[in-house]
Image (spheres, rainbow, N blue to C red):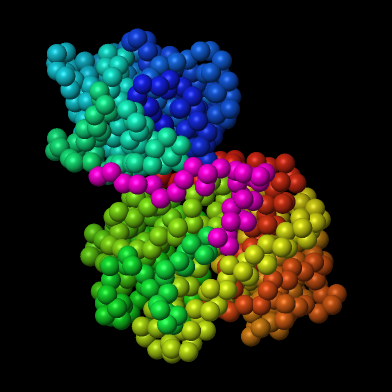
Amino acid sequence: MCGIVGYIGNRDATPILIEGLKRLEYRGYDSAGVAILKNGNLNLKKQKGRVAELSRKALNNGMSGSLGISHTRWATHGGVTEENAHPHVSQDGKIAMAHNGVIENYVSIKKFLESKGYSFYSETDSEVFVNLIAYHYEKEDEDSPTRFFDSVRKCLRHIEGTYGIAVMCTECPNELVGARKGSPLIVGIGDEEFLIASDVSALISRTSNVVYLNDGELVSLKNGKLNLRTTDEEDLEPEIQKVDWEIQDSELGDYEHYMLKEIFEQPTALENAMRGRFTDDSSTAKFGGLNVSAQELRQVDRILFCACGTAWHACLVAEYLVERYARIPVEVEYASEFRYRNAPLDKHTLVIVISQSGETIDTLAALRESKRKGYKTLAINNSVGSTIARESDGGIYQHAGPEIGVASTKAFTSQLHIISMLALYLGRLRDMSYQDGVEYVEALKKAPELVADALKLNDQIEEMAAKYKDMQDCLFLGRQDMFPIALEGALKLKEISYIHAEGYPAAEMKHGPIALIGNECPAIVLATQPDIHTKLLSNIQEVKARGASVISVVNQSNPMPEGLVDDQIVIPDCHRSILPTLASIPMQLLSYHIAKMRGCDVDKPRNLAKSVTVE
């Protein structure tokens, strides 16, 4: 969940590394550091807090050199201190390393190294890691041209856990080494230069040519050459891929926050999700990368969706949409629980995992467990070349563009739209009629326009946010496919504004949560389904009877009776298949404006990081 950037070439590394760290800061922002090697001397700067502080410290002190590594941290082992910040340096001062991941056997390694006379200054597992490399380096033949690379490779044989590392050595000033297991690492190939990073966003300003490392692979960047090997000493031919987006896609532009920018990019993201994915007669969807035949899909009698966080809420929406339109039973699992539960799966079960980054460690573990047991496993993700994309049997790319804000917005609605398209595709393989398919496709194509209309509510919602910004608790209520949107609304509010919020099925409120209701705990009610509108009116009456304020989200054709609610957000009428997407927009805008008014760091909420790559 941290960010790594390394550089080797013929330019000054320091500004390149700092720029890369700024682009990766959404992956971790409690401390940062940079190490530059020049003339055999290691110059190291670390700083608690944001990359901007490190930038002043590094650039104002004249750090320069053409080889360097850097890191922005999300703390796992050890508190937020300069001592615990990366890069870490070995006791002898020869090896410097930036590390993402968790070393599970660091205690036993530390005891071993202490018995050899090593001492430690930090609380981290990473410092143990770098000293183990130094230990092996001292044991290697001094005259070996691959001494440094071999010392890293031999060290990795003793490491249990996950890692993405960038390593350099004072005695090898022309070499940068990287390796990965369970934590992403990417090599960027530039003009007489190489970069190494945990995310393509750190590389894209300098190159669009990249090599995605697989687990168990090491790379040596030395004398203008890229050498790729496995920990078992197998030489590999690197596969160079092209990044399919440009640097301006990740720029803030005229917006105050990335979250707001990405909220307003949703019409475009939905257009991109649909491009080229309908049949010529516009009666169904089509997907080029599923790698599952229509005949095989007709044999599926159960679908299991797995994900974490916001993507898990998308899975819950999938349960409603796929069961409604394709009539296939669906179950939803937290990816973090799936591989430990040993859940019984029928042989005709299809597993689908969802991850925006394609690197979520729990979701990746669920995918691997599913494949290990022989189940066909597909993925919905937003990152071409990600580990989940490469390891799944097939899948669907979102093409939503880079999402920088930690709180997911356009990636979530893009997932919902693809899920709706998938429900259509599966339904048309079964008993959905041609005419119903045509109407469904028309509704999907209209979604970007309707979302753009919903975004026009921004000013109204901003005024409403001023009224509720000081609340300490909030309840989000919805029924059927609005229940997952209630969960998502609650998650958005609490993760960026730090207000305690919970989402519940509206009818479940009277079975416990109603105890929270009062004049200091308003309720946001998603009342968008005509078939159960009267039931939701009863739920609202129960809330109002206990003195709580109510904000309702309704359709144009189905408003609340006058005087029943305190505030009302009216979204356009739409087909049921895109209703969850449309209803998400007010939830995002309300959370954004409340967080902004409370002075919260919207794009970098405390304790959170964008891509969760540790268990």
- 157 horizontally vs 247: left or right: left
Closer-to-camera residue (506/485): 485
Magenta region: 239-268
- 214 horizontally vs 383: left or right: left
Residue 170, image x, y percentages: 31, 14
Q: How many marks?
A: 0
Residue 163, image x, y percentages: 33, 37
Residue 283, image x, y percentages: 44, 82
- 328 horizontally vs 604: left or right: left
In this rendering, is residue 450 above or below 205? Answer: below
Say if residue 362 shows up in the picture. no
Residue 149, image x, y percentages: 22, 25
The residue depicted at 45 percent of the width and 73 percent of the height is 421
In this rendering, is residue 231 above or below 515? Answer: above
Closer-to-camera residue (567/400): 400
The residue depicted at 49 percent of the width and 53 percent of the height is 401
